[in-house]
Image (cartoon, rainbow, N blue to C red):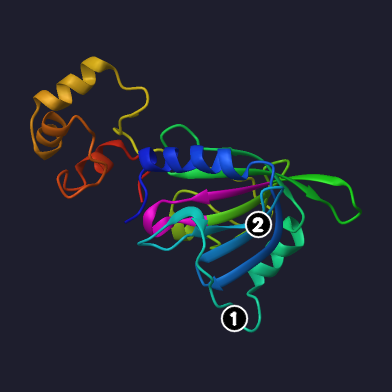
């Protein structure tokens, strides 16, 4: 099940605690839409899985060992060039969006310190993995998008990165008032019933029928 903005916030917090400060040792691309970053630090190695799959876009640590293709894809080789040896400085999530940003301190071609950012957009069919430089210029993306394809923005090397447009009418679950929560609950429906019975908010659970994600996801697919 794809992550919504609320679950992604929890994942981001866990990753921030566990892998901030670690260095990227290796980069693999075992599948078309999956990137594996092998990380190393004082506590030992670990693997970060990044998936831009239309139905299972996600980011998390994994112990699963993927089989890599005989020859790495072009995007994998580009990530290796720019990210091998880079240190994870910070992990952020734009408020209420299904986006995670990894700020990285990388080593440039001449051995100089170079800031990079790996942006993971977990937005359903439009999910993507985008690498930018310190000026926000796109170095490359897993899926290149021309303006004629998206109708709203282009994701191409050399362009300034612009995040996906915010979907109008969506609520911010982290900024919503108690009064608004009460209004939602009083309106009834499966979400309200589940919350009243359990005291929890069912994010895209069967009880909610996906209604919470539909209400609170900040970015449209």
Answer left or right for 3 relative to 187: right
Q: 201 above or below 51? A: above
Give the foreground label among 1 and 2. 2
> Compared with residue 171, is residue 204 higher up or lower down, i.e. above or below?
below
Q: Nearer the viewer, residue 143 or 5?
A: 5
Packing grade of label 1 (10 A; few <14, some 14-19, many >=20) is few
**Quick check: is 119 in the magenta stretch?**
yes
Identify the residue at the far right of this view: 110
Left or right side of 9 for 197: left
Asked whether residue 188 appears in the rendered view, the answer is yes
The image shows a total of numbered marks equal to: 2
Asked whether residue 162 is in view, the answer is: no
Residue 99 in picture, x, y percent from top left = 48, 44
Rendered residue at 59%/70% (across/down): 29
For residue 205, above or below residue 33:
above
Residue at disc 1, secondary structure: loop
In the picture, the disc for residue 219 is: none
**For mark 1, what is the residue?**
69
Q: Which residue corresponds to the image point at 59% horizontal and 54% vertical from the top-left? A: 130
Q: Nearer the viewer, residue 149 or 61?
A: 61
Q: Nearer the viewer, residue 77 or 62?
A: 62
Q: Secondary structure at mark 2?
A: loop
> Badge 2 local density, few (<14 within 10 Å), some, or many (20+)?
few
Q: Residue 136: x percent and y percent?
A: 67, 43
Name the residue: 70% across, 69% down.
77
Q: Marks 1 and 2, Cα distance to the nearest angstrom? A: 22 Å
Specify the segment rendered in magenta: 117-128
Give me the disc on residue 45: 2
Q: Residue furthest front?
A: 43
Can you name the residue that lies furthest to the top here? 179
């Amino acid at each position: 099940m794809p992550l919504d903005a609320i679950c992604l916030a929890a994942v981001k917090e866990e990753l921030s605690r566990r892998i901030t400060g670690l260095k990227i040792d290796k980069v693999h691309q075992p599948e078309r839409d999956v990137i594996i970053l092998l990380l190393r630090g004082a506590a030992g190695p670990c693997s970060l899985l990044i998936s831009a799959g239309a139905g299972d876009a996600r980011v998390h640590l994994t112990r699963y060992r993927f089989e890599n293709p005989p020859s790495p894809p072009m995007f994998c080789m580009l990530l290796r060039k720019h990210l091998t040896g880079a240190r994870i400085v910070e992990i952020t999530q734009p408020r209420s969006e299904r986006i995670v940003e990894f700020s990285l301190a990388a080593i440039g071609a001449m051995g100089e310190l170079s800031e990079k950012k790996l942006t993971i957009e977990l937005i359903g069919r439009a999910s993507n993995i985008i690498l930018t430089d310190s000026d926000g210029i796109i170095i490359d993306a897993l899926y290149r998008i021309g303006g004629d394809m998206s109708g709203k923005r282009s994701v191409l090397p050399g362009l300034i990165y612009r995040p996906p447009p915010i979907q109008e009418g969506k609520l911010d679950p982290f900024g919503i008032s108690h009064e608004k929560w009460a209004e939602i609950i009083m309106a009834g429906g499966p979400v309200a019933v589940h919350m009243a019975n359990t005291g929890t908010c069912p994010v895209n659970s069967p009880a909610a029928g996906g209604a919470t994600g539909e209400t609170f996801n900040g970015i449209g697919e």
